[in-house]
Image (cartoon, rainbow, N blue to C red):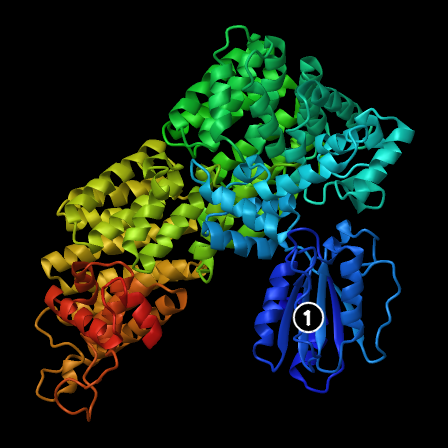
């Protein structure tokens, strides 16, 4: 702890630990609660390690300075606290002690600079005679920074505090340690329990110790001057002298005198050049609460006028003052100006919060509601908040007094939010259809916007031909409207529809987006078109085009003020990184994105799904299910169609790995129906191979063949490289399953070639994970063919007693073993623990025993054997013994024995403790 106070303490520490060092006097200054006493205690504890006597002196205490025993000590550490409390007699005695400091001695003298009787002179006005060899230093204790406050919050409240809450804690407390600790204690004890949000910090009042201090200082200001302190409390931030005079109502002369008295008594502090207020911002609330109601209203009214003259005008603060003053009309006018200003500068969440609070106020005039509600809806569609807003708008749209045009606009924005941000597709679709009809006659441009939204095929429900029908209507309506922004909106969704279907026209349409348009409304639609195109390119497998589309789309989103579009691009980036094998740190990036979009979990759907897919590959199957369900917030059936298909494929794969074949087949039929109903066939790519395998292994080969044939016909000649690779994989799976059932060696070799074709296609994209899975499939088929038809496996052929296989078969099998080795390496590089373990298990069944190894099992003494380590790793990932046995081709009993051995050797007390124990032994 001493080191954190800087190099100024070094000479003092050396003075009491080195016998002949020169004496040192250290002045330590800090405001009330700044940590002075804590520092002295640290110095006292440090001095116990040196041959020095510690003497504590608390100024202003009844018992006075400590007794030195009638003689001067060569090594003495004086710890003098609260010099600002000392009277003249005590200061005189202290000066005599400090003037007599000898080599090997030191003194630390602390004080509050704001309470010194003579500013800047802690020892008073009398001259001080310093010994010639005395080193005199001054050290100011700095307030805690945000990082330090965050650590204190974690100690007091756990890790649940959001970054925004920590930032506000630092801002409201000024980083004063005592205030930080007291406020954290109050938050810890509050009921209902603190959940870690910034809103809870903002609502917290001043801690008792701080309130007592600031109120005592305020009371010490003469009553005639006290309004200047009240004015500072109402303004609640740094203010100029003239502003304080205006709000207090004291006038220039009296106001200046009042400010000087408030500064002298530390009721107020100078916060910057010509700016005054409370040293600890949180203190303002304590003072404000003591101001009589009518006086406080007058102060707020004058504060609104003062803030209206600042440039730029902080309209949200002006609105708050008008409301506190009871001026309802001015309040609503200022709220509207604040929301319009926030929207213009892209601060949509600020606008949303203000408008939600305003619209929730009882007795709001209908005309004001009709003006403010569309503002809220417009910001909510563009911004990143939707949970409360949806409920507020749903209530307002039922108001019979609303003008039809306003109701239609609200219904449009509500429908967009329900679909795009909440995942409530059926409700949102109905809202949009009604809005398109309501707005067609009264506000045709907004009707076009509703039609444009209905073009998007991503939402569950509604077939491709329905979306194409809305496209035809929207194109005609956009041309009739003459509105460039609406034309851009239709174009953006037309591109999304064409890209999703792998229509080659999409790339030409993309060039028509108004990316250079200076109208923010047009630019936002162009940004959305680019980001949606990037998302479609990811699903199609055009990964080489994704980076450029995302970069341009994000830049345009930021420039035009479209945070929702910008965040959707970040979500697409996570999906792109998963598919292209950019896995290091991807789990953390997904979790960070989920945390950053906590108010809108649907926006984080890509992050949830990618995190679940990583958990599957890592063998953490319990976690995978939690991520796929978005930790209980959404079911997979509520996801956008391509994301839902990918999730369904992973869930089917898990069921197959657990030998739950019937459940896998049932899930495959339901998921496949959703894709068929939609009719966008490239979106089947992440589902088809696993769905085909589930049906084939369940014995429903007819349905599996139909699935492959339908997939192929649906794709037709479309340029969808990922889907074409998946189609080849699906054919390989079906051929392998049938060949194994019929024990046909030629069928297995045919399947191997299909797998290799799929692997080559994935390599081109590139998608290394499915490339490894299909390469593994090819090798698996070759090795299975090696044992089909009575031939001995290639490994056994090295024994002269075995019947040798033809040279071509041997070469093919050896090549397959090499392929498996490459798969293990690929899985290991990616971090796919489960896949690596499964492939190593397959390799072990075919690789010959090492020559020269003594008979019997090798001894590993107290170290884990390779098999024990492998089993333990899967166990701590969350797999059951049965799942591990299926992965490693072992019996459950053998798995149980390996886990017991790993626990014994690592010292683990339970299966849960095995992860920590393995970390210690690795």
Task: Kindly give the residue lying farthest to the bottom in the view shown.
Answer: 852
Q: Residue visible at 21% across and 52% down?
A: 656
* Whether residue 388 is situated above or below residue 87 in the rendered picture: above
Q: Secondary structure at mark 1?
A: strand
Image quadrant in which you'd find residue 81: bottom right
Quick one: 787 or 338, which is closer to the camera? 338
* Whether residue 145 is situated above or below residue 182 in the rendered picture: below
Image quadrant in which you'd find residue 634: top left
**From this viewpoint, is residue 716 visible?**
no
Identify the residue position indicated by label 1 in the image. Answer: 78
Quick one: 348 or 718, which is closer to the camera? 348
Task: Kindly give the residue lying farthest to the right in the view shown.
Answer: 253
Q: Position of residue 546 (x, y in %)?
A: 54, 50
Q: Is residue 729 left or right of residue 380?
A: left
Quick one: 809 or 698, which is closer to the camera? 698
Could you tell me how many numbered marks the image carries? 1
* Whether residue 781 is situated above or below residue 505 in the rendered picture: below
Q: Position of residue 52 (x, y in %)?
A: 63, 79
Q: Residue visible at 42% across and 51% down?
A: 721
**From this viewpoint, is residue 572 visible?**
yes
Q: Is residue 358 left or right of residue 728?
A: right
Q: Which quarter of the rendering shows the N terminus?
A: bottom right
Quick one: 231 or 787, which is closer to the camera? 231
Q: Position of residue 144 (x, y in %)?
A: 63, 55
Q: Residues within 10 Å of mark 1 (few under 14, many from 20)?
A: many
Image quadrant in which you'd find residue 784: bottom left
Q: Is residue 259 left or right of residue 417?
A: right
């Amino acid at each position: 702890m001493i080191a954190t106070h800087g190099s100024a303490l070094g000479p003092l520490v050396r003075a009491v630990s080195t016998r002949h060092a020169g004496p040192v006097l250290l002045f330590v200054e800090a405001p009330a609660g700044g940590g002075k006493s804590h520092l002295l205690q640290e110095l006292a504890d440090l001095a116990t390690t040196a041959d020095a006597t510690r003497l504590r002196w608390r100024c202003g205490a009844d018992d006075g300075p400590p007794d030195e025993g009638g003689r001067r000590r060569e090594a003495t550490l004086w710890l003098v606290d609260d010099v600002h409390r000392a009277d003249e007699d005590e200061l005189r005695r202290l000066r005599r002690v400090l003037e007599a400091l000898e080599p090997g001695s030191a003194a630390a003298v602390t004080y509050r600079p704001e309470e010194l009787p003579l500013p800047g002179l802690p020892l008073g006005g009398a001259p001080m005679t310093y010994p010639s060899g005395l080193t005199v230093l001054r050290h100011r204790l700095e307030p805690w920074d945000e990082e330090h406050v965050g650590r204190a919050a974690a100690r007091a409240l756990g890790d649940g505090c959001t970054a925004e809450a920590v930032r506000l804690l630092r801002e409201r407390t000024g980083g004063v340690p005592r205030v930080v600790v007291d406020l954290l204690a109050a938050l810890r004890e509050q009921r209902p329990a603190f959940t870690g949000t910034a809103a809870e910090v903002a609502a917290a009042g001043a801690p008792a110790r701080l309130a007592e201090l600031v109120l005592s200082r305020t009371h010490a200001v003469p009553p005639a001057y006290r309004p200047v302190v009240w004015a500072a409390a109402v303004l609640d931030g740094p203010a100029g002298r003239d502003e304080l005079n205006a709000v207090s109502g004291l006038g220039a002369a009296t106001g200046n005198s009042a400010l000087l008295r408030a500064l002298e008594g530390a009721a107020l502090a100078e916060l910057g050049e010509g700016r005054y207020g409370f040293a600890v911002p949180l203190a303002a609330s304590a003072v404000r609460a003591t101001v009589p109601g009518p006086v406080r209203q007058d102060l707020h009214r004058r504060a609104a006028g003062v803030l209206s003259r600042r440039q730029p005008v902080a309209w949200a603060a002006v609105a708050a003052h008008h409301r506190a003053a009871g001026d309802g009309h001015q309040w609503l006018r200022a709220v509207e100006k604040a929301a319009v200003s926030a929207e213009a500068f892209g601060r949509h969440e600020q606008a949303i919060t203000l408008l939600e609070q305003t619209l929730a106020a009882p007795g709001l005039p209908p005309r004001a509601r009709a003006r403010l509600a569309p503002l809220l809806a417009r910001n909510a569609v563009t911004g990143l908040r939707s949970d409360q807003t949806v409920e507020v708008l749903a209530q307002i749209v039922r108001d019979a007094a609303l003008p039809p045009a306003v109701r239609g606009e609200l219904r449009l924005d509500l429908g967009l939010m329900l679909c795009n941000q909440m995942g409530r597709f059926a409700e949102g679709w109905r809202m949009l259809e009604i809005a398109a009809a309501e707005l067609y006659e009264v506000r045709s441009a907004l009707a076009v916007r509703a039609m444009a939204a209905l073009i998007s095929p991503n939402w569950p429900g509604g077939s491709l031909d329905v979306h194409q029908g809305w496209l035809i209507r929207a194109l005609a309506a956009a041309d009739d409207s003459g509105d460039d922004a609406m034309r851009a909106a239709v174009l953006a969704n037309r591109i999304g529809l064409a890209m999703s279907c792998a229509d080659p026209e999409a790339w030409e349409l993309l060039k028509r987006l108004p990316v250079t348009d200076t109208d923010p409304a047009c630019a936002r639609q162009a940004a959305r078109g680019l980001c949606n195109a990037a998302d479609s390119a990811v699903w199609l497998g055009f990964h080489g085009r994704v980076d450029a589309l995302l970069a341009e789309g994000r830049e345009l989103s930021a420039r035009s003020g479209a945070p929702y579009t910008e965040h959707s691009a970040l979500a697409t980036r996570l999906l792109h990184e998963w598919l292209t094998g950019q896995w290091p740190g991807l789990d953390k990036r997904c979790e960070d994105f989920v945390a950053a979009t906590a108010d809108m979990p649907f926006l984080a759907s890509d992050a949830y799904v990618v995190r679940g897919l990583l958990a599957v590959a890592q063998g953490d199957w319990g976690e995978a299910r939690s991520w796929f369900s978005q930790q209980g917030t959404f079911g997979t059936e509520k996801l956008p169609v391509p994301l839902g298909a990918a999730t369904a494929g992973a869930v089917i794969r898990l069921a197959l790995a657990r030998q739950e074949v019937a459940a896998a087949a049932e899930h495959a039929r339901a998921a496949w129906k959703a894709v068929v109903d939609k009719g966008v066939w490239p979106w089947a790519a992440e589902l088809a191979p696993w769905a085909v395998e589930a049906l084939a292994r369940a014995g429903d080969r007819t349905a599996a063949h139909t699935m492959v044939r339908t997939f192929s016909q649906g794709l037709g000649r479309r340029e969808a490289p990922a889907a074409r690779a998946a189609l080849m994989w699906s054919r390989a799976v079906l051929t392998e399953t049938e060949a194994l059932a019929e024990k046909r060696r030629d069928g297995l070799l045919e399947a191997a070639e299909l797998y290799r074709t799929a692997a080559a296609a994935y390599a081109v994209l590139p998608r290394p994970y499915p490339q490894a899975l299909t390469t593994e499939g090819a090798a698996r088929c070759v090795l299975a063919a090696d044992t089909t038809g009575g031939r001995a496996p290639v490994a056994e052929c090295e024994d002269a007693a075995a019947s040798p296989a033809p040279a071509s078969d041997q070469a093919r099998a050896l090549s397959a073993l090499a392929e498996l080795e490459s798969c293990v390496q690929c899985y290991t590089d990616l971090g796919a623990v489960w896949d690596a373990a499964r492939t190593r298990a397959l390799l072990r069944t075919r690789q010959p025993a090492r020559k020269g190894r003594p008979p019997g099992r090798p001894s590993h003494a107290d170290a884990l054997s390779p098999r024990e380590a492998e089993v333990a790793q899967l166990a701590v990932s969350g797999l059951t013994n049965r799942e591990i046995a299926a992965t490693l081709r072992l019996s459950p009993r053998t798995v149980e024995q390996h886990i017991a051995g790993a626990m014994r050797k690592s010292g683990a007390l339970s299966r849960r403790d095995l992860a920590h124990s393995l970390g210690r032994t690795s």
